[in-house]
Image (cartoon, rainbow, N blue to C red):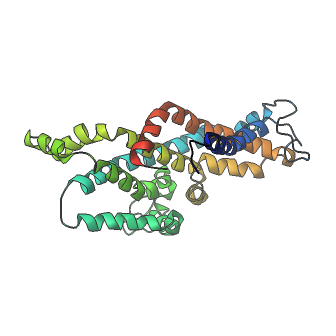
Amino acid sequence: MNRRRFPWLSYLVVVTGAVLTVVPFLDMVMTSFKGPGEAGTLPYRFLPEAFDLSNYRAAVDQLDLPVLFRNSVVATALITGSVLLTSSLAGYALAKLRFPGRDLVFRLVLSTMMFPPFLFFIPHFLILVHWPLAGGNDLTGRGGAGLTVSIVALAMPFLVSSFGIFLTRQFMVSIPDEVLEAARIDGAGEFTVWWRIVLPQTTPVLVTLGLLTFVDAWNEYIWALLVSTANPDVMTLPVGIQLLQDHVDPTRTMPVVMAGLVLSVLPVLVLFLLLQKYYIRGVMLSGLK
């Protein structure tokens, strides 16, 4: 089928995709303003009878919002910063440095992408529990709770991303070697080459990777739930919102949970709007679909 003969088909596909993406988000926002007994009733009403802000007050009252936001922000910042740093350094090494076993290392990195992350959650948790000289542990890792009592535990399994290394490596391969060699001839070391030449050219793909990592880290639930069972003080926003269902009046559960979700989505939405031009450019340059 010739797209030029049927231009309306392309517009139809785009509009349909946009509607399927936006409507659930709008429904979440509208539900957060509904009063008691309005959510989940038949016939279904998309708009609330009256926009009720009490759901947001209830969500804030039930959640220790400053603490949950702090935990989520700290964990997400640690993960995103570490992934960007390690991915750019490893990607540069695998793309532009020549050393024995480079291709084997790259294949090993790719092989780790075949396993689901939650497969390693229990081993990670046991490693944190028996971390030496932390959380009351002795040198052999016994006697205490290890790093599970620390907010660092939220970030530990996600500090390095094989996908991030792959993405940055594939992008850095396209940087001309002649430019790097000219810098080395002028006396620049490898760190200077990476910092002053490679990183500025990889800004779009790093912003893309940063946004993807930020969203994944901000929304992480299973690992955060596992860690928060050991130490409730490190509970994050997604875990706290899920627990709202156990503490709210059943007639108001869904609107209050939706209000909590809206509050949780706002930082991600603001960050995307601020960085969307870099994100779109990074998607185009890196070939992501």
**Residue 217: % across, % down:** 52, 49
Give me the residue at 51% from left, 55% from top.
149
Does residue 244 lie above or below 102 as drawn? Answer: above
Which corner quadrant of the image does residue 36 belong to? Answer: top right
Q: 117 or 106, which is in the foreground?
A: 106
Query: Residue 73 in the image: x percent, y percent?
Result: 52, 41
Give the image location of residue 171, x and y in percent.
33, 49
Q: Residue furthest right?
A: 43
Question: Looking at the picture, how far across and down is residue 238, in whole percent?
Answer: 63, 49
> From the viewer's perspective, is 113 left or right of 63?
left
Left/right of residue 144 with respect to residue 169 in the rendered view: right
Please say if 130 is above or below 278: below
The residue lying at 43 percent from left, 43 percent from top is 284
Name the side, left or right, on which 28 lies relative to 82.
right
Q: Is residue 16 visible?
A: yes
Residue located 61% across and 40% down the image: 7
Q: Residue at x 68, y 47 (%)?
A: 241
Is 190 situated left or right of 124 in this image?
left
